[in-house]
Image: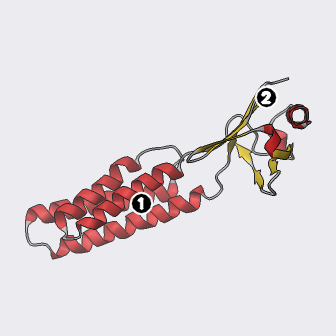
Amino acid sequence: MQHSYQFIIKDNKYKSYIKLASLLFFISGLIFLLKGIRMHTAFDKIILFGGSFVLIVYSVYCWLYKQKQEKSYFIIYPLCAIVLDIETPYWYLSIAYVLLMIFHYLMEKDLIIRISGEQIKVKDLLTHTYAWNEFNNIVLMDALLTLDFKNNKVMQVEPGGENFPDQKGLLSNYDAFEKGFNEFCKLHLRP
């Protein structure tokens, strides 16, 4: 019997977040392009057209190919902030891009649930530690993890990641894993 279990929770909304970020990059690229057309100096045109090209190409890349945990956006958000700061009087929008980068970074962190004999840790933006006596039940059934708190709060999540099957049938010993996990939880939930 294992002494601890770790579940990485699937983020089913991640693709929606990336589509929204891609749209933001694309619109920013178009704005830089339009602003570049109106500029008179060659330096300003090069900066804005170059920024526009990078943003439009990156928005298409994000829309089609970007994977979670790939940190390529660490270059793009500061690029937008720098171009906005240099080429427009709207310096405060560059601060917004830096804040969006921080939000994007936080959004890409995995939700991890670690269940050991001593405690249950739920790690998202912050780490929350719970004692076993705070739960009515913890059960894994049909690839769905349910944490039933005594305060009537219920957390139901779908584990994912490389150590857990996407469908029940992908892990050859899934039934034994599920049974072992549920027995482990029953043992620690007893008063």
Q: Residue 88: horizontal and vertical position, in percent?
A: 19, 69
Q: Which residue is mark 2?
A: 117
User: Taking 113 as reference, is 30 left or right?
Assistant: left
- Most foreground residue, 123 or 165: 123
- Most foreground residue, 94 or 87: 94
Amino acid of disc 1: Ser
Residue at left 28%, top 55%?
79
Amino acid of disc 2: Gly
SS at mark 1?
Answer: helix
Vertical placement of 63 versus 90: above or below?
A: above
The color scheme shown is secondary structure
Category of crowding for the residue at label 1, using alpha-carbon neighbours closer than 10 angstroms: few (below 14), some (14–19), many (at least 20) = many
Q: Which residue is mark 1?
A: 59
Residue at left 90%, top 32%?
187
Could you tell me which quadrant the N terminus lies in? Answer: top right
Residue at left 51%, top 63%?
19
Q: Quadrant of residue 154?
A: bottom right
User: Taking 39 as reference, is 120 left or right?
Assistant: right
Could you tell me which quadrant the C terminus lies in? Answer: top right
Query: Is tag 1's residue or tag 2's residue first in the polypeptide sequence?
Result: 1
Give the Cα distance between marks 1 and 2.
Answer: 45 Å
Vertical placement of 40 versus 120: above or below?
A: below
